[in-house]
Amino acid sequence: MSYTQYGFDPAQIERIKLKMKNPETKERVKMILQGVTKYDLQDRVKVRRFVGMLTKALGERVTEQQTEQLVQFVISQKIDPNNAFHLIKLWSMFR
């Protein structure tokens, strides 16, 4: 399943991928997501809060509609951050 099915702008994804190559930015994102569980990633309120913190850390402006698309994407993927297969699947989706 591709992220474009959720309405993400490929240019924005490329911009974020470029920003994530910066070691300082990468560390900030890791700190925000440290200790996140699969149950946290299925809770709409927590995911919305993570999206807000991450977009702020990355310096990205997102609309309310884009925020909702991100939340829906994360919840529908049923991501388990402790499962290597899930992380590889996500990595391959955005490479």
Image (cartoon, rainbow, N blue to C red):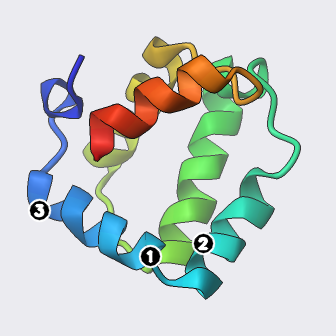
Q: Secondary structure at mark 3?
A: helix
Query: Of marks 1 and 2, which one's residue comes earlier in the chain?
Result: 1
Q: Image point 52% across, 19% down: which residue? A: 75
Residue 11 horizontal side relative to residue 57, left or right: left
Camera-near label (3 vs 1) is: 1
Residue 72 on image: x %, y %: 41, 24
- For the residue marked with disc 1, what is the amino acid? Lys
Q: Which residue is mark 3?
A: 11
Picture quadrant where residue 61 is located: bottom left
Residue 67 horizontal side relative to residue 46, left or right: left
Q: Which residue is mark 1?
A: 21
Query: Of marks 2 and 3, which one's residue comes earlier in the chain?
Result: 3
10 over 86 or under it: above or below: below
Q: Which residue is mark 2?
A: 26
Residue 74 on image: x %, y %: 49, 28
Residue 54 horizontal side relative to residue 3, left or right: right
Residue 36 on image: x %, y %: 80, 38
65 over 14 or under it: above or below: above
Picture quadrant where residue 78 is located: top right
Examine the rendering and report whether any part of residue 61 can be seen. no
State how far apart marks 1 and 2 are (Cα). 7 Å
Q: Image point 32% across, 74% down: which residue? A: 18
State how far apart marks 3 and 1 are (Cα). 16 Å
Query: Of marks 3 and 1, which one's residue comes earlier in the chain?
Result: 3
Q: Quadrant of the N terminus?
A: top left
- Alpha-carbon neighbours of circle 3 within 10 Å: few (<14), some, or many (≥20)? few
- For the residue marked with disc 3, what is the amino acid? Ala
Residue 94 on image: x %, y %: 30, 43
Picture quadrant where residue 82 is located: top right
